[in-house]
Image (cartoon, rainbow, N blue to C red):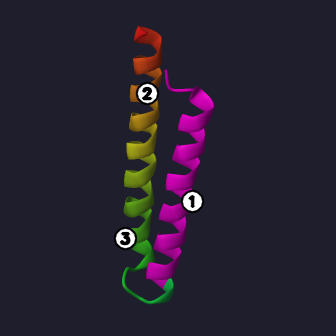
């Protein structure tokens, strides 16, 4: 059984890495600030969907 603490930790790591990569991309002028909002929103939605999926998996067992 997967522990919720590990899931939350992995989601935080994913979010942290995404924010770091988006910051680097902005500083190197690969993406503009308008595009970064959608990038961050997409990552937030994906990570929350993964979290909800894992919680449902834990409830089934």
Tell me, for residue 16, which label it has, or none.
1
Residue 12 included in the magenta stretch of the image? yes
Do callouts 1 and 3 mark residues in contact (Cβ within 8 Å)? no
From the top left corner, tell me how far across and down residue 58 is, in percent. Answer: 47, 17
Residue 16 included in the magenta stretch of the image? yes
Q: Secondary structure at mark 3?
A: helix
The residue under the point 39% across, 27% down is: 53
Mark toward the viewer: 2 or 3: 2
Q: Give the distance between the C-alpha atoms of the residues marked 2 and 1, in whole angstroms.
A: 19 Å
Q: How busy is the neighbourhood of tag 2: few (under 14 within 10 Å), some, or many (20 plus)? A: some
Up-down: is 5 above or below 26?
Answer: above
From the top left corner, tell me how far across and down residue 33 is, in percent. Answer: 45, 75
- Labels 2 and 3: the sequence-earlier one: 3
Q: Secondary structure at mark 1?
A: helix
In the image, 32 versus 58, the foreground residue is 58
Do callouts 2 and 1 mark residues in contact (Cβ within 8 Å)? no
Magenta-colored span: 1-26
The residue under the point 57% across, 59% down is: 16
Residue where numbered disc 2 is placed: 54
- Labels 1 and 3: the sequence-earlier one: 1
Up-down: is 16 above or below 34?
Answer: above
Tell me, for residue 35, which label it has, or none.
3
Q: Quadrant location of the C terminus?
A: top left
Q: How busy is the neighbourhood of tag 3: few (under 14 within 10 Å), some, or many (20 plus)? A: few
Q: Quadrant of residue 4?
A: top right
- Labels 2 and 1: the sequence-earlier one: 1
From the top left corner, tell me how far across and down residue 49 is, in percent. Answer: 39, 35
Overall secondary structure of the magenta section: helix
């Amino acid at each position: 059984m997967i522990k919720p603490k590990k899931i939350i930790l992995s989601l935080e790591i994913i979010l942290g890495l995404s924010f770091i990569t988006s910051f680097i991309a902005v500083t190197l002028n690969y993406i503009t600030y308008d595009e970064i909002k959608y990038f961050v929103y997409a990552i937030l939605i994906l990570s929350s969907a993964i979290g909800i999926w894992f919680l449902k998996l834990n409830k089934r067992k």
